[in-house]
Every structure is written in structure tokens, then in C-alpha cells.
Amino acid sequence: MKSLFFTAFLILNLSNFAFAQSKKPNFIIIFTDDQGYGDLGIFGHPSIKTPNLDQMAMEGQKWTNFYVAANVCTPSRSALMTGRLPVRTGMFSNTRRVLFPDSDGGLPASENSIATLLKTSGYATKAIGKWHLGHLPAYLPTSHGFDSYFGIPYSNDMDRINDVDAKEAFANPKYQYFNVPLMRDTEIVERPADQNTITKRYTEEAIKYIRENKEIPFFIYLAHSLPHVPLFASKDFLGTSDRGLYGDVIEEIDWSVGEILKTLKKEGLDQNTYVVFTSDNGPWLVYNEQGGSSGGLFGGKGTSYEGGVRVPTIIWGPGNVKPGVVNQIGSTMDLLPTLCSLSDTQKPDDRIYDGYDLSPVLKGENKSPREEMFYYHGDRLFAVRKRDYKLYFYKNNPLGYPAKVEKLDTLQLFHLPHDPSERFDIAAENPEIIAEIQALVKEHQSKLVMGATQLEKRIEK
Amino acid sequence: MKSLFFTAFLILNLSNFAFAQSKKPNFIIIFTDDQGYGDLGIFGHPSIKTPNLDQMAMEGQKWTNFYVAANVCTPSRSALMTGRLPVRTGMFSNTRRVLFPDSDGGLPASENSIATLLKTSGYATKAIGKWHLGHLPAYLPTSHGFDSYFGIPYSNDMDRINDVDAKEAFANPKYQYFNVPLMRDTEIVERPADQNTITKRYTEEAIKYIRENKEIPFFIYLAHSLPHVPLFASKDFLGTSDRGLYGDVIEEIDWSVGEILKTLKKEGLDQNTYVVFTSDNGPWLVYNEQGGSSGGLFGGKGTSYEGGVRVPTIIWGPGNVKPGVVNQIGSTMDLLPTLCSLSDTQKPDDRIYDGYDLSPVLKGENKSPREEMFYYHGDRLFAVRKRDYKLYFYKNNPLGYPAKVEKLDTLQLFHLPHDPSERFDIAAENPEIIAEIQALVKEHQSKLVMGATQLEKRIEK
């Protein structure tokens, strides 16, 4: 009897395997908000426990030099979704750094999102969580290639009711203080969104979608609205972590990741699904204990120092992603070309992409096609990394506030692998490296056509 | 034929298993020198790869709040070896913070080392690597319970030859610049010790010892002399890491750990051996790129801020140590009572121990018996941790240099799990916690009998 069961089990698994080989792979991008480089166990946090993410990193690739294209929310998200720098797509501004409830702009229709492209390959597409690329109908996920959407359209601290003091609202957050809408597709289904249960509900939505779409290739973009302040955790997690409320939030996200991976395994989809975990920018340090930590990196959200733009990243895909630690450079902008490559999806060739196809690195190749990163702060080129070296043209407060950005009188240069905390400026000893990076900048800028800013448009009252 | 092999294999393994159950467990303590909290992959370093230590941590316990008793070498090592604070044993000083080649002192004969105690339970005992508890015959490992010894008696930067400039000697180290002796038991067998191959030779010595002693319980104290500056790596590792020479050194130590665990598995000893990996103090930050990193912690070697005294610690023992992350407080001083407990070894009851038996935590209990740490700097009580809170009485430069230590005008208090980087002083809001810690200090000091300093004695010329 036992061996009969075993044989049946084997056949079932073999058929799953055969099936997995013939179907295009599924993709899940899990994108957290303001989670710092140091805010996972396996990225070194001393009091937050993330057993599911730790295990995911051991089974997959832990990327230690993975960047977002901008140090705040809206531009960073636009770059992930389009594979292009915000300065090209218009998702940048020097005065309004993200979209607000009174914004009249969003991701232009001329931009192709990952979802739009994957749709051409027959993918089912779902966006869950925070969008923040425009909350008006023309800009919502359903206008950008997603079959359906469930989440909040902008940050969870927006629409604050006027009679609550900001300090009180953040120190003892109640979701009623923030009149943020929860949307299904283009409709508001709850307002204010009950943020206590939001991570849980996003997770349930993702799991349901996986179960309902296991016969066709799917793409899920799960953009958690936390740990952006104000912080909320469900009853099961509230008060349970050693790190206080911030830790409760991360540990609930870790639980969520665990549930999703468990579902993939249970449904026999793990061998044909790539899961990416990353964050949209560094920790919001000015919120003290309610903000996260960039670990040993310098600076946080709102700066283009390493702590503001390097994000904790894990790429998982049993049988498809060669496990290990990857110290090579990658970026959220690389996800679009990588997912297109893995799914045999064509990208339109009428525009410049800033992303690279990382699929060879996922398969185990030792050298990333990405050798440089341009770190824009609004329209200003704040810094550039080329291979091991990062050259700074600007400076600002490492806490990201006050927000003032100033041109450096003397350029600063750091060797990041040797000096990840950016303690030792080696500009004076390395004029030839500076010249090399300056040449790269010149070439980059010669091809750059700036998009018209979308972030400064306001709804007329 | 195949099944015959399998049956034979099974019998062999069962006999190993039965044998393992009847024998006292083996212990290996791997102790690195000046390795910072952030200098392992699994503790968050972005460019040093430590796959063997990462795996060891996943199979065992990763301790995130594990402390040494002092922020420099000699006192820290004495505390590990005796389970007692340096102020009790005399292994402290305010003027000479460690032992030097001209020192006439060392660990007093009245102190019992872990090895001395384990010998009473029939253990074979071996010390490998840096000792630094006295290089005169009365103080060497063989006078403190070790059957044999192979290593250097003090730091690898000592006995520098006079005609080499210090800056040159550290920037482009050649082992010939440092006339450090390599000893076997009480004899000098090589001088200067060839430090290029020293990690490799320590490892070979440990593996040989494991193989030769597998029939009896053994204790190996493997105290690497690196990554203390000057840095050396063998040919196989030189120039191979992304982190430069410092990374090469750590990656060679990681290799060494892997070889030792592999040997234990191969010899069928893994189910009956506990392996502890830890460091003697924080990174020596004043040596810039040649020093390590405390990750997100504040300060380094020579300070009692978290970066100076919290060390990356892994405790491994398949089948005996419940895998997971442990955020509870532990200390190198706890190793003596823990090893005694695990091996049913009696400790003399004529003295105060500062260590606690952590064996319940190793088995999976959620609560460490250790709730406090006293951080001495010489004879001054610099800070005290009680559960989540750390209270500072003194301050010094977080880089550990200049070495001046000053009394604080206003005490400082930090909640370490919430604020591991010690950014937010919460003394003003928490007078009752300060009072509680002050009461603890009073009680502690009422029972404290200071030992006579051993570190200021010099050989007469």
C-alpha cells in the first residue's frame, strides 16, 4: 500500500515536472517599502528574525550589491516597472519627490510596464499592494498591463486627517488617522484602509491568485505598503518581535514570504517560479526607531549614499537559480529585461532601457552584465558607480533630511567592496579612475533625453 | 550487491551512533582575532563571502547578542578561558591593556582554564593558535590544562623589527618584519613564524588532532591569530576576495571552518561534537581597510560600545543544538560553565564565576540564564547591560583611539534590541531603569574582589 502511494506520488510529481518544463515560468516580485539593507536576519539585523527570508536566501541567491534607481518611492517604483531611469520617463522632480493625493500625473501611457510586456506572452498579471505610480484611472495598474489590482494607490501616511498632530499620528498610529483608500481594480472598496490587517490581506490575495492561476503563467507584483511609517501589524504579530513595532512589521512580511513559498511548493509550482524579494529604497532614518536600518551602510532614504539606494535582495527559483551569494551589481531596473528574457518576451526597440538581462547570473555565471549605476537625485546626477568605484558629485545629509542637496567642491571616490561603509575617500590617489567615470557620464548624458516631469502636476481645484 | 553495501553502511552508521551516545561530547572553540560583528556573510557583510560559516549558522544557532568580557585581546581571552571577569583574575590593566613580549605576567596558576577542568573528565586537550595569556613557561597552554600546544604566544604584530617603519610594516606586511615565535608546546620551532601559511597550518593541526583522538572525548581551542593586523593569507586565498586582503583572510578562515566540519562529518563525530565560532573583540577600526567592520553596531575594538564587545557567534552541534537565531544574551564567559555542564564536569566552588550554563538554550529553551553583562575597561565599569537596556558610565572615542576614557557627566541609556546602533539616548525618560541597573551594579561590586594586575609586570633586563 505504502509503495503504491509512493508510486502514485512519483507519477504525479513527474507529471508536474513535465508540465513545468513546457510552461513559461511564473514570476513574483515582492517589493517592500523603506526596508533598509540591514533589516533582515541574513543581511545582519541583530534583533529582527526572518527565518523564511533567511531560508529563501540560502536556497536562492542573496544579492549584496543590488540597487534601486532612486532613493524615494515613486521614482524607484517607476524604474522597476519600466526598466528605465526616472529621468527618461518623467517620474522625477526636484521639488515634489513623489506623487501625492493631489497629483495629476503618473506613469505615462507611452511607458511599457513589466506587466504590459508579459501580457504579450500570455501571462496572467496581478498587482497587489502599494502602487504609487498615479492614482487617477489612466495611471492605475489596470491601465498598465495588470489584469487586476488590490491595494492602496499611494503611501500609507497620506491623506492624514487634519485634526491629528503629526507626531501623535506616527508615534501611536491608528489607521483611522490616515484616510488612504483601498482599491480593487479601479474602485475604492474601503476607506480608510484598515492597515492593521493589510499585510495579511495582501498575502491572502497573492495565495488565492497563485492557486487560481496555476495552469497559466502568471506575474504577481506584490508591493507591501509597509514598513513605511505609520507602522501596523496584525494581532498575531503585534508586540511579538524583539525590535518593537518595526520588527513586528518585518516579521509579518517574513511570514508572508514563507506562506507564498509554501504555497508554490504545495501547488508544485516552485520549480517553475522565480521569486524576487527587494525593497524600494533605504530606511527612513529620521523616524528613529520607527525607521529601519541600513546595517553597515552609510545614509538612508532620501540620499544616494549606499544606505539609501542599496537594497536587500533575494532571487529564488529552485532548479533555475543557482544558490549562492552574488556580490555583482544588479538593479531593480534589470528585472524587466531579465523577466522578458526568461519568458521569451520581446521588448519594443524604440527606446533606451537602463536594465540588463541578469538571467546568465541567475543560472550561475560569475559576471553581471551590469557594471555601472547612475544615481540620480531628481534631475541631478548625484553619484555614479563603475564596477568597484563610486564617484560622488553631490552631497546631502546622510539622514536624508534636511533635504538640501549641494554640489561637492571636491569629488569624492570610494572603493565599495573594500569599504562598504564609505569611510575612506580615495579621490586624491585615483585621478585616472575619476577620469574614466567622467567619460562614462559624458557618454551617458550625450544620449539622455529627459522626460517631462509627471510629479509636479496637480489636480486643479 | 547494492543493498549489501547499503546494509553495511547502515550498520557502520548505527555503530557510530551508539558509540556517539555513550561518549562525552567533543568541543571545539574557534576564536578569531579582531573580527567584527559585521565581518561574516550571515552577519551582513556585503563583500566577504563565508559560505561555510553561513551554512554552519543555518545548521546551528546564530547568536546575535553574544559578548566578550573585554574589548581587547588578553583580558577577553582570559575571560573565555576561566569563565571569570578579568578584574577578578588580574588579567586587566589601565595602562598596559594586553600582554607584551616583555611581560612577566600571565594567567595565574590559581585560575582553572576550561582545559584544566575538562581534563578531570578525561578529555584530550589541545590549544592551537594565539594564546596571549602569558608566554613564559608558567603561563603557556601546557601549564593550563592543555596536553599540547601549537601556535604563537602573543599577537602577530609584536616583536616588530626596528628598522621597518610601522606604516610600511602594516601596509605591505611581510612576516619577516615581525619576529613572532611559533611554538610547539614550550619550544620555539620557527622564528619568525611564517604567517602566510599560519591559518592553513593551524587547520591541518586541528584536523590531525580530530583524527587521532576520535576514540576519546577531546577539546580543541583553535584561536586564529588573524584577522589581527598585519594580515596574511596563503597563496590559495591571496587576492581572491572582493574585500581585499582583509576579505582574503576571513575567507581562508571560512575555508578552515568548512574543513573542520567536513572532517567531523567524515569521521562520524558531528553528532557528538559542539563547535563554537566567535571572536575576541570588535574590529580594529583605526587600521581602516585592514581593520574589519562592526556592521550596524557603533564603535570597535578598544571601546565597550556594542561594536567593540558584541561578537559574531555561531554554536553548532547537529542533533544537540536546536537550529535557529538566538537573540538572547550570551558571553564567552558562559562557555566554561556550558562545556562543564554538557560534559558532566565539576567546577571548583571556591570562587565566583561570571559565566552561565547556556546548555538549556542550546537545547532550544527560549530564555538565556544570562540577563546582564558588565563591560569593564581596565578596572573601570564602562557600561552595564540588563536585559534590553545598556547604561553607560564612561565614554571614549568610538574608533578606540585616542585611548582616553572619560566619565560621563550624564549617564546614557539605550534600548539595544530596538536600537542596535545606539543612536537614541533614552536616559532622561527612564530613571527607574537607571535605578534598577545602579542597584545591580551595587550588588555586583559588593562581592567583587579585584585580582592583582598581571599585565603591568615586566621582565627585568
Image (cartoon, coloured by chain):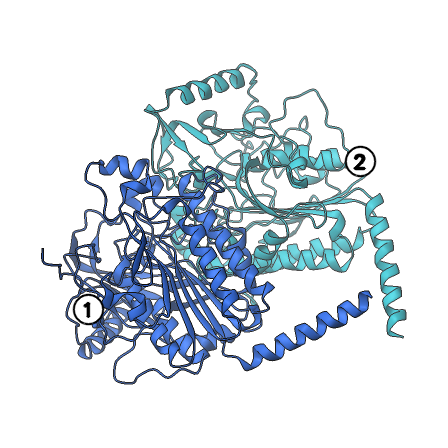
Chain colours: A blue, B cyan
Q: Quadrant of the C terminus of chain B?
A: top right
x 69%, y 30%: residue: B112
* Residue topped by disc 2: B121
What x and y, as percent, mark residue A352?
26, 79
* Residue topped by disc 1: A90
Query: Do we see residue B102 in this rendering?
Result: no
Query: Do we see residue A252 in this rendering?
Result: yes
The image quadrant of residue B430 is top left
What is the three-letter code of the residue carrying label 2? Ser
Out of A250 and A157, give the one closest to the viewer: A157
Eyeballing the image, is A97 above or below B239?
Answer: above
Judging from the image, mark 1 belongs to the subunit labelled A
The image quadrant of residue B370 is top right
Q: How far apart are the two marked residues, 1 and 2, measured between alpha carbons?
A: 74 Å
What is the three-letter code of the residue carrying label 1? Gly
Judging from the image, mark 2 belongs to the subunit labelled B
What x and y, as percent, mark residue B134?
60, 36
Q: In which quarter of the image is the N terminus of chain B?
A: bottom right
Eyeballing the image, is B79 above or below A76?
Answer: above
x 57%, y 36%: residue: B330
Out of B358 and B129, give the one closest to the viewer: B358
Secondary element at image label 1: loop
